[in-house]
Structure formats: structure tokens, C-alpha cells
Image: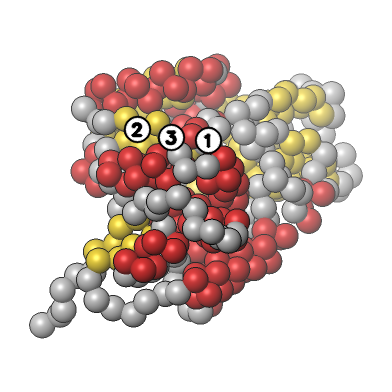
Amino acid sequence: MSGPQKQHRLTATGGEAPGRGNEAINLEAMAWVMRLTSGEATAADAEALNRWRAQSQTHRRAFAEANLLWDKLGPAAVEMVSRAGKVVPLARQQGVGQQGARQQGVGQQGGGPRLGRRALLGGTMAAAAAAAGYAIVRPPFALWPSFADLAADYRTGKGEQRRITLAGTVSVELNTETSIALRPGAGEESRIELISGEAAIAASGPRAAPFVVLAGAGHVAAANARFNVRLDGSTVRVTCLEGTVQATCRGRAATIQANQQIVYGEPGLSQVAAVDPEVVSAWQQGLLVFRYMPFDQVVEEINRYRPGRIIVMNAELKQRSVVANFRLDRLDQAIDQLAGAFGAHVTSLPEGIVLLS
């Protein structure tokens, strides 16, 4: 029989102890951010966080900085540390016991080993170091450019969109947090590389060679067509809106017609599938359109455009199906509309963090 389940919770601390340095407060702030993104946070946690932040300007500043760091490096840190198997994320191994709670602002109910201040610091530093190594290669360019981004010719930040004209007859529209680079082509062929994000391409007029988009492990080519290319990690999603587009990955090629989509990545090319073009291209009209999409995926899509972070804390809510249209310039209204439609409770925190429960 397994032992009792350990319960983890964050507790608000009292005033700062004499001689207590910012280092300890920074650790507490990082633990708070990790708790909020763990999927286990509660409304009580949100109230406790507000009490913790109210202690001093130092606490509030530390939380803002931790949120920014986690927003940029947290996922990479968890991934790298998990692979290395050397450090357990703080969100799951919070400091333990009442003495630790008083000193660290993080408590654990029940028995079990205790993580002291040095262990917490070591875990945080190891995670940050692992994330830094990853981030040098592929960080969000909003924080600093990666090696690939240094070669980018055009970029957009979060919530920004930009249209450029290439080769006279090719229009490229960059969506939020997108980076592209001009690449040399063979003969009269024109090429760009989608380094990150999403781009809509319109190639028209007489062309002796197709326009090519390099993305992930393959490339997309079209002579007279409108198409959308989105890169999520190593997965590339290609949608043809008009004309004909050819996608190639790992030696295999497939042709897609208007209103069709194909996905490629590590496994190779997927099957060609029908798609609703209005959903794919809605961002070009300043909209987000969802058709029977799970609630948590809707929130993740909104997070691509909105500063801060929306966090869904209710497991059942995450699976609810959403049919909705939202304006990109009114995404805070989208939060209220989602909450009202599904009976979710909204807790607004500093730095653009919103909890839905």
C-alpha cells in the first residue's frame, strides 16, 4: 500500500526577518510563479500570494522579475532539468515544514524529506543554468536574440504584426512573435526561412521559379498561391488558402490545394486534411476564431498575443469545447467572455497574470 499523498501548498510569510537578504525573497518569488503554473494552484494560493506581495516593494519587484524570467525560460528550464534528472522542479518539491515556511515562504504538510535554503537555491540555479544553455540557442527574441535570430532580417514582438514585400510579387505578413530570414535560392528561386512563429505568404504574377519557405525539417514551395506556415517547436503546419502548394519533408513531398492543410515534423509528413480557411487566416483580419477547440488550447492561443499569462486551474474547465470569435485588440474582454460563458472565476494578479478556476 502506498503511503499518504503529500500535500503541497504555499504560505504567506510575515514581515522580513532582520538581516534577510533579497536572495531568499527571490527564491520565494520563483516558487510562487512555479506554483501558479503547476496546474495545482487554488484561489487560496492567489490570496496568499497577494499577502506575500503586500509585505514590501522588494517582494513585489521580485515577483515581477520572477514572472518575466519564468515566462521566458521556465519551460526550457523544466525540460532541460527533467531530462538531466538532477533537479526536481520547485513547483513540485516546495520547501518543507513550518520552519522552512517561515524562512522561505513555502510550506509542505505531512512528512518527507526537507529541502533547505541551499537545496532550493541549488535547484533554482541549476534550472536557470540549464535553461540558459538552451536559451542561447533558442530563446524568445523578445528577451535577447538567439544565434538563429541574429540572422533574422525581420521580426515581430508579442501582439505585433508586420507586412513586407519581397521579390516584387511576394507579400509576407508576420504574425505575433515571428522571425524570418532571407536565404539565397538556386537560380531565380527566392527563399525565406521561418525561424519562429507564423507567416502568411501571397505569391503572385509570372514566376520562373517557385517561392520557397524553409521551416523546421522541410520546406514549402509555391508559384501562384496564398498560404500560411506556422512553426510550433519542431512541428510545421502548412495551410493552402488559394492555388497549389507543395510541402517537402525528409525526402517525401505532398501537394495541397486550397482549403487543405498538412503537418510535418520529426515523424515526417501527415495526411492532407480539409481545413476551415477562415479559422487559419483570422489573425490577418485582427481576429481569433475557434471552432470546437478545448478551453485550454484556446487560452494558449490567446497567450500568444497577450502580455502576461492566463492560467486555467480547473481540470474540467480545460476540456470544455469552445466556439467563439475574439478581437485581437480586445483580448481582456475575451477573458471575461470565456469566464461568463463557462462560469469560471477570474482572479487577476500583477504582471498580467489571470487565474481561471
Whether residue 47 sits left or right of residue 180 in the image: it is left
Residue in view at x 45 percent, y 39 percent:
54
Instruction: Tell me the CA gap for discs 2 and 1.
Output: 13 Å
Q: Residue furthest front?
A: 18
Counting other residues with Cα less than 10 Å from the Cα at mark 2, is it few (<14), some (14-19), or many (20 or more)?
some
Counting other residues with Cα less than 10 Å from the Cα at mark 3, is it few (<14), some (14-19), or many (20 or more)?
some
Whether residue 342 sits left or right of residue 223 in the image: it is left
Q: Is residue 330 above or below residue 28?
A: above
Query: Which residue corresponds to mark 1?
Result: 351
Residue in view at x 86 percent, y 46 percent:
184
Quarter of the N terminus within the rendering: bottom left
Q: Secondary structure at mark 2?
A: strand
Asked whether residue 276 is in view, the answer is: yes
Q: Position of residue 175 (x, y in %)?
A: 62, 31
Counting other residues with Cα less than 10 Å from the Cα at mark 1, is it few (<14), some (14-19), or many (20 or more)?
some
In this rendered view, identify the residue nearer to me: 183 or 204: 183
Q: Position of residue 110 (x, y in %)?
A: 22, 71
CB-based contact (under 8 Å), mark 2 and mark 3 = yes
Query: Which residue corresponds to mark 3?
Result: 349
